[in-house]
Structure formats: structure tokens, C-alpha cells
Amino acid sequence: MADAVVQWVKILETPRFLTIGRQPSEGEQVMVVTRAALAAPFALSVHTTQHGRSILQGVFTWAAVNLAPPKARKDRHWFDLGVELEWAGERLQGRIYEADGENGTAER
């Protein structure tokens, strides 16, 4: 709805995280993080003139790729309503690659 206003958002439990990196190359001291993602279960209150207030629940997922230069960073977000953290957590690895169009193969 065009007049929808989010009144509040609450994270319901500890998010799931996924981080992918590559081994350090010569001259680097630590692993280089190249991809990261999280899935966070939420509840939110939204108000519209036509429908009044509604409480919605679901999982917000964020994935970022190309975190190490020289490639340009890309971020992607999903709001999955009516799903549980377990469902979204199972999709983190696929989504971390979907964020830049790759097919889910591991980085080397």
C-alpha cells in the first residue's frame, strides 16, 4: 500500500550468519572475507489507512559479495514473510552466491 508506515521492527532471535573467504595470499596475514550473509527473524507493525495496523512476521536475509577489492561490492536483500529462521538458514549458502549470479560453487 502506498501509505504503509512501519511503526516498529523487532528481531525475534539470534540471526544465522555465513561468512566465506579465501586463504591469505603472499603478504596477507589473515583470511580475506569475500562474502557474508545473515538471516534474522523479525516481527513488524505496519499501519495503512485502508487496513489499519497489521503485525507481520518473517525473516530478513542480507547477502554481500565481492567484499575484497578489486571487484565492486554487491548487496542483496530478501524479506520472506511467514517463514521460520530454519527455512531461511537453509537458503543462506544459495543466496550468498545468488547475490552475484553464481551457481553456488565454493571459492578457492
Image: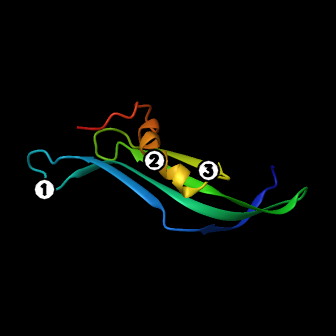
Number of the label disc, if any, that sits on residue 79:
3
Answer yes or no: is residue 97 visible: yes
Q: Which kind of residue does numbered mark 1 sit on?
A: Gln
Sequence order check: which comes first, mark 2 or mark 3? 3
Q: Which residue is nearer to you in this view: 3 or 42?
A: 42
Q: Mark 1 points at which residue?
A: 29
Here the colouring is rainbow
In the rendered structure, which disc, 2 or 1, sits on the residue that comes first in sequence?
A: 1
Q: Is residue 61 visible?
A: no
Q: Residue at x 91, y 55 (%)?
A: 50
Residue at the extreme front of the image, as rendered: 86
Q: What element carries label 1?
A: loop
Q: Is residue 97 left or right of residue 11?
A: left
Residue shown at 54%/57% (left/top)?
85
- Marks 2 and 1, Cα distance to the nearest angstrom? 28 Å
- 2 or 1: mark nearer the eye: 2
Quadrant of residue 45 within the rendered picture: bottom right
